[in-house]
Structure formats: C-alpha cells, structure tokens
Amino acid sequence: MSPSRSRAGSAAAEELAAAILRALRRSPNQSVDLAPLAEDLGADPLAVQLAVERLHARRMLVAPFIEPGRAGGAELTAIGLRWLIAREGGIPKDVPVALRAATGRVRSEDEAARLPRAQVYGTRRSGPSG
C-alpha cells in the first residue's frame, strides 16, 4: 500500500470519527443509535461499527452494546469531546458550574454555621463584639 493511499484512508477514517462524535455531541449523556447516521453518510454499517470500536478503544466514546453487522450505539466521553473541539474549534456548550468563577458568596452565613468547622473556629460576625 502506498503512503498516499494510507494517508487518504486515515483521513477518511478521521472524517468518519468526527462525524460520529458530532452526532453524539448533539445528544449529551445519552446513548445514541448510529444506524441512521450510517444511512445519512451512505457508509456501510459495519464500517461505522468498526469506527465506533476504534473510538471506544481510544476512550473517546462509550459503546454500551456491540451488535454484529449494525452501526450500534454509543455515548460521547469527555476525551472525545476534547478531541472534537481541538479538531473543529469552539467551546463546550455548557460550562460546568465547578469551572465558572463565583460572582458572590459561595456559602451563606447560615450554611457556614452548620459546617463542623464552625463549631471549632466559630463564624465571622459583623459589627462590634460585646
């Protein structure tokens, strides 16, 4: 096999992988049946299944079931989402709350008083102490 032919094959495999990950990105945290995607792309369902298995081995998606001869289903992982964003640009649709900067107090004074640390150190009180 010539080097240009192998590069063309790897580019086609990468395009198929990107199409699969894009389809999974539309339905986050859900297992998506990829048979309709195989029909839309005009690809052989067996080729889509093999691509899903390769992506599963690379931990880019979770393949909950593998049914021989069908495109099967899958669920996108964070690794697959990072790869897709690095390849096509953009940002994740929903930024997790843990990664957002706090704009106000994180805990109210009432909640802070219930924490075990408050029993040892006390809570900060405003105003002069008597």
Image (cartoon, helix red, strand yellow):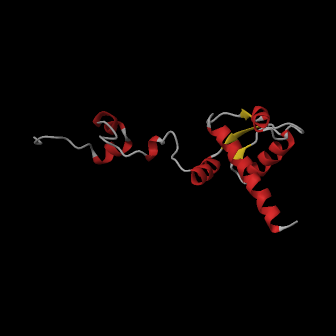
Closer-to-camera residue (92/107): 92
Residue 4 x/y as whole percent: 79, 65
- Horizontally, residue 68 falls left or right of residue 101, namely right
Closer-to-camera residue (25/79): 25
Residue 90 x/y as whole percent: 52, 47
Q: Quadrant of the C terminus?
A: top left
Q: Quadrant of the N terminus?
A: bottom right
Residue for point 71% across, 42% down = 20
Q: Tally the marks.
A: 0
Residue 2 x/y as whole percent: 85, 67
**From what the image shows, is residue 70 above or below residue 1?**
above
Q: Quadrant of residue 126?
A: top left
Residue for point 32% across, 43% down = 118
Residue 69 x/y as whole percent: 89, 38
Residue for point 68% across, 47% down = 18
- Residue at the bottom extreme of this rendering: 3
